[in-house]
């Protein structure tokens, strides 16, 4: 029975949002007119979907707790992203908290968003990936035993696999054996 449950476990690619799916502006992005989908993202998501991965967005949104915008604004941006990508994203997790207001177990580098998804979707962490553009994204993944790929030009140590963007990361993931 346990073997059967293990067999039924699914795999996912967790996706940070700003700097991975949409252009990082160096400020909070909450107006849909400021939300610009990165080049290659629709193709990247299609490739990952073809490989059988669930596609789950995990995004820190401290601007909600700071009162800069609302959850509805985040969902409006998410809908714009879905419309640009053929509705390929399976779920969206957001962490609204900020340490200046209250500590949050969801906010990356903490891992509660990922743990909730692992439970909800019966994921095998060893078969999952996370693509992020900041070390805190990969730290959250590591806490759950999920391999990370860093995208963008953020300088990091050699122990992290890095690609220039999500499409390159997806193509690299496609070449891995797990
Ligand atoms: Mg980011």
Image (cartoon, rainbow, N blue to C red):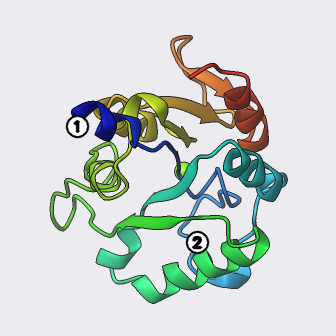
Q: Is residue 106 left or right of residue 71?
A: left
Q: Residue at x 62, y 83 (%)?
A: 31
Q: Which residue is mark 1?
A: 1
Figure check: 155 above or below 40: above
Q: Quadrant of residue 62?
A: bottom left
Figure check: 64 above or below 125: below
Q: Secondary structure at mark 1?
A: loop
Query: Alpha carbon of mark 1 to alpha carbon of mark 2: how far?
Result: 46 Å
Q: Which residue is mark 2?
A: 29
User: Crowding near pointer 2: few (<14 within 10 Å), some, many (20+)?
Assistant: many
* For marks 1 and 2 on the same chain, the one whose residue lies earlier in the sequence: 1
Figure check: 167 above or below 16: above
User: In the image, residue 160 lies at what x, y percent?
Assistant: 54, 19
User: Crowding near pointer 1: few (<14 within 10 Å), some, many (20+)?
Assistant: few
Residue 91 is marked as none
Answer whether residue 177 is visible to the viewer in this image. Answer: yes
User: In the image, residue 40 lies at what x, y percent?
Assistant: 83, 51
User: In the image, residue 46 lies at what x, y percent?
Assistant: 76, 54
Q: Residue furthest left?
A: 102
Q: Quadrant of residue 35?
A: bottom right
Q: Residue at x 74, y 78 (%)?
A: 83
Q: Residue at x 16, y 57 (%)?
A: 103
Give the mark toward the camera: 1 or 2: 1
Q: Residue at x 30, y 40 (%)?
A: 5
- Of 129 and 3, the residue lying toward us: 3
- Of 114 and 19, the residue lying toward us: 114
Figure check: 7 above or below 44: above
- Ligand 1 within 8 angstroms of badge 2 C-beta: no
């Amino acid at each position: 029975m346990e073997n059967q449950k293990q067999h039924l476990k699914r795999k996912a690619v967790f996706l940070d949002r700003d700097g991975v799916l949409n252009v990082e502006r160096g400020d909070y992005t909450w107006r849909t007119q400021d939300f610009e989908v990165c080049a290659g993202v629709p193709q990247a998501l299609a490739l990952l979907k073809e490989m059988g991965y669930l596609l789950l967005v995990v995004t820190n949104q401290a601007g909600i707790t700071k009162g800069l915008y609302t959850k509805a604004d985040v969902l409006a941006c998410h809908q714009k992203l879905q419309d640009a990508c053929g509705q390929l994203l399976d779920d969206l997790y957001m962490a609204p908290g900020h340490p200046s207001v209250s500590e949050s177990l969801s906010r990356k580098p903490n891992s509660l968003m990922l743990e909730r998804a692992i439970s909800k979707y019966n994921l095998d962490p060893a078969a999952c990936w996370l693509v992020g553009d900041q070390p805190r994204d990969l730290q959250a993944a590591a806490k759950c035993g999920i391999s990370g790929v860093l995208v963008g030009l953020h300088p990091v140590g050699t122990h992290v696999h890095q690609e220039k963007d999500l499409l390159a990361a997806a193509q690299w993931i496609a070449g891995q054996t797990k």
